[in-house]
Amino acid sequence: MVTEACKKNHVTVNGLVAKPSKEVFPTDKITFRKDQITQIITVLDIPENRVGAKLVDIYRRNDTPAEAYQHLELLKLSKEHYRKNGTGRPTKKDRRDIDEFGNEKDEDIENE
């Protein structure tokens, strides 16, 4: 997953596009896009050996602004406004209501 993101130039290290084999050092800033927000991670230290997922936070710091997470929360809420998660596909009536909603705006513009 990360290798694909690097190949598509979606990951930067200190402002430069990173290849999958890019070596990182302490104080490097890694920027990538995940879940529609740009996240910034600062490398604090490099472990000697592989570590478990619970210990990863010792070696990195998340510098992503809080506003980005608030924006993500608003996006999630706006998607759930019309249909709640787990309610299935829209019914024919729901589909017609959606189509009418879009057509009402087009008719208002034509009448002006």
Image (tube, helix red, strand yellow):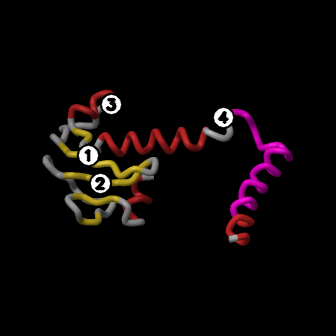
First in sequence, mark 3 or 1: give its number: 1
**Image point (78%, 55%), residue name:** 100
Q: Which residue is mark 4?
A: 84
Callout 3, which amino acid? Answer: Gly
Q: Which residue is mark 3?
A: 52
| Residue at the limit of the structure toward the top, as seen here | 54
First in sequence, mark 4 or 3: give its number: 3
User: In the picture, residue 77 is in which quadrant?
Assistant: top right
**Quadrant (top left/top right/bottom left/bottom right) for the C terminus:** bottom right
Check if mark 1's residue and mark 2's residue have beta carbons within 8 Å: yes
Answer whether residue 96 is magenta in the image: yes
| 53 to 25, vertically: above or below | above
Instruction: Identify the magenta region.
Output: 84-105
Left or right? Give the position of 4 relative to 38. Answer: right
Check if mark 2's residue and mark 3's residue have beta carbons within 8 Å: no
| 81 to 24, vertically: above or below | above
